[in-house]
Each structure stands twice: as structure tokens, then as C-alpha cells.
Amino acid sequence: MPGKPSLIASAALLVGLLAPGLPAESPAAQAPGAAIQQPQPTFRVTVNLVTLDVIPRTGGGQFVADLGKDDFEVLEDGVVQEVASVVLVHGGRVFNLLQPVAPPAPPTPEGIILPPARPPDDAAGRIFVLLIDDLHFTAIDTPFVRALLKKISSTLLHPGDMYAIFSTGPSSIEIPLTYDRARLDDAIGKVTGHGMTFRDIMDAGEGSQGPQGLRYAAHVAFSTVYSLVGDLEHVRDRRKAVILISNGYDFDPFPKGRTGTDQVFGGRYGTPLVDAERGDRFLSLSQQNNRFADADLASELVAVTGAANRANASLYTIDPRGLVGTVNLADQVDPGEMRDHLAKTQSSLRLLAEATGGIAVVNDNDFDGALKRIDAETSDYYVLGYYASNTDPNHRTRGVEVRVRREDVKVWSRTWYRSRVERQPPSPRR
């Protein structure tokens, strides 16, 4: 809407304004005979290997597979960092370029009794996490989501790839990392949309944060993503792709329709909850608090993308609605409000993807082409590792730039990450 900052702009601003970690404190020295005081909490930044996925390509789009350590230059906040590890993943196979790779173990004989041999984790395969946000697509969208998941199973996942699949809502799908493709086929049949329809949103009771249940469903979805990408921090030297299937997020949808002031249908006009002659259109609490709805949503998105960048995981967001129009008369939604709602939900999915190095498949019916692109981006890449020279706990958001010392080579990599601040355990009592 004119005059209002975009969702992406709000998120970018919040990245710089998020509260920094607290400085470390040391307990004061105790005078002889003085009472022992409880130790003050201290905070530290965990010094871990920072890893970056890097995809170098020629001007013609060809992946460059013959680069070494000296061909890369990594800068954090403008300061050159020493590259500590370089791993090349080419065609799904992993090559450690700074130390020799141990020879693969002999294959396990296969037969009627023994299970099929699985590739060792350090030799081949990719890692995909499929997150089905069934709280943010409706029951009508269920056939489209199931068809999309079947495409992912048949075209994106290859032998040797590991995957996990989870749902955010009543579909109750929870399959940890596995090679077993049969479990995915079983899970697809359980997927069912439980999101609120447009009329559900406008007919729901209003709380202090807008339509009842809307924020809660979003919080569950974001918490699930945050938890999953946090677990991926322990996986090294692999490109970790989280594929999020969702219709997107909007904390303040159809505000005029909900208050009966839209241009076409009058929202709740004529329902038992409204007295049109008195002008009772539910204006009050929610309308005042929802002034900050876009900022609240941006804050949630920044938290998720920060966790993903810390884990070096990329979010690939897919809107199962595909190419969407403006309004269906049966929905009884003002066309202008529908355009705003679609723009916000699609922007939220774009931000999640673009801020973490993935792609957003929104307002597009070419799912086959999108899956082919995801396949290519997760098959050929480098993983660079370095130990950050800046250990200041107050400086959590770090800008990163990767350069390649070759002409006619363009390089893609993530451009920022957030360091983790951990609370130290208290000293044992004497």
C-alpha cells in the first residue's frame, strides 16, 4: 500500500536493530571474611567454524569445479578471513580439498536377508528437509500439495539423498532424516490442509492481535522452522535445503473487511455480531494493535532467517497456489484487500528464501522448472569454512562477501549470518 514500508524493508531494518548480546561480566573479588555472593551470569559467543555455501559459475552459467583454496577470498565485515576448509560437492559427490579423503569402505553385499547398502555420509548424497505448513494452506489446496510432493519425490530426491519431512499442524507428520523413500510416499497420503479460508479470517472473533488463531498458527510454523534449522547446525560440509510449502504469512489480513468498512461487501455486515445502524463494526482493540502487525511479522522472519544462516541452511519456499488471480466472487473479499493480502503472503515467502540463499516459487505454475533449479543448486557447490577473527559478543550480525580470483566467474554465497550468544553455566558453589 502507498506510504507503508514493504515487508522486506521492515525486515532489513530489524536486522540492524535486533538487541545485541550482553557484554561479559566478571564476579567482583571477595574480601576476606565477606559473605559469598552469587556469581553474576556471563555471556559468550561460541567460536565455531563459520561455513558458507558458494556457487561459482562462468558468464554462460557453467559451474566451475577446479577451484582451490587460493582461488577464494572471504571477507567478514570487510576484513579478510583465513579459509580453514574447502569442500567441493560436484554431481552430489563430496571432495575435501584440504585433506585427503579416506577410501570408501567396501560395499555391503546385498541379498534377500541383508538390507540394501547405504552410501556413507561422507561420500555422497544431499540433505533435504520438507516442511509441510498445513496450518497455512486450506483443505481445498490439499490435492495440489500432494501432487507437488509427488513431483519432489520423483524428480528432486535421488539415490543417496537423505530427507526428513515434518508438518506444522494436524497432519501430524514427523519423519527424521532417512533414506527410505517409501516412508515419504506414505506421508504424502496423510497431508491435509487446515489453514483458515478468507471467510474464516473475516468471520473469526477479534483478539488483541487480530483474528483469533491467526498469530498462534504462524508462531507454530515459525517455531517449527526455527527448531529444524537449529538441529541442522550439527551437519557439516553439506548443502542443507529446507523446502517450505506454504501459502505465506500476513498478520493483518483484510483489515477493512474485518471491520465492515471495505468498498464492496462490508465484511461482517449482516452477521449477528454486528449492528450496522449503530456503526458497530469491531473497530477498537485489534485495529489499534495491528498497526504493528507488519513489523511483528518482519521480526519473526528475521529470527528464522538468522537461524538458517547460522546453520548454513537455505530455505526454498513454494506456494502451492501457483499463479493466483485477484479475487473470487464466492470469497466475498474486496479486490483491493485481496491484492494487498497476496502481496504480503508472497513477500514473506520471498524474504525467507532470498535472505537464506534459496529461491521462492510464488505466483508460478512451473513447479517442474523450479525443482530442476533446486536440484542443480544442491548438486554442485563449494563449502568454505573459516573461524571469524571478530569475537566481539556485541557484534552479532556479520556481513560476509566471497570473491573468486578468476576472471569471468560470478560467485553466489550468502551475505550475512548471526553469531550465537550462549549463557555460561553458573560456577559451582563452594
Image (cartoon, rainbow, N blue to C red):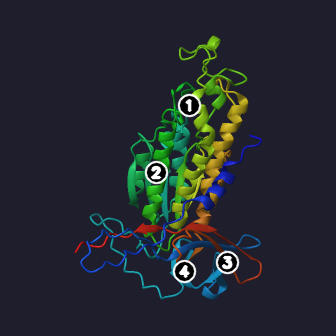
Quadrant in which residue 168 is drawn: top left
The answer to whether residue 165 is above or below residue 270 is: below
Which element is circle 4 on? strand
Amino acid at circle 2: Ser
Which residue is tagged 1? 285
Instruction: Give whichever of discs 1 and 3 has the lower sequence position.
Output: 3
Which residue is tagged 4? 386
Crowd class of label 4 (few under 14; some 14 to 19; many from 20; radius 10 Å): some
Disc marking residue 78: 3
Which residue is tagged 2? 223
Q: Does the CB distance between marks 4 and 3 fall below 8 Å?
A: no
Q: Nearer the viewer, mark 4 or mark 1?
A: 1
Q: Residue at x 68, y 44 (%)?
A: 363
Quadrant in which residue 11 is drawn: bottom right
The answer to whether residue 252 is above or below residue 152 is: above
x%, y% of residue 322? 64, 43
Instruction: Give whichever of discs 4 and 3 has the lower sequence position.
Output: 3
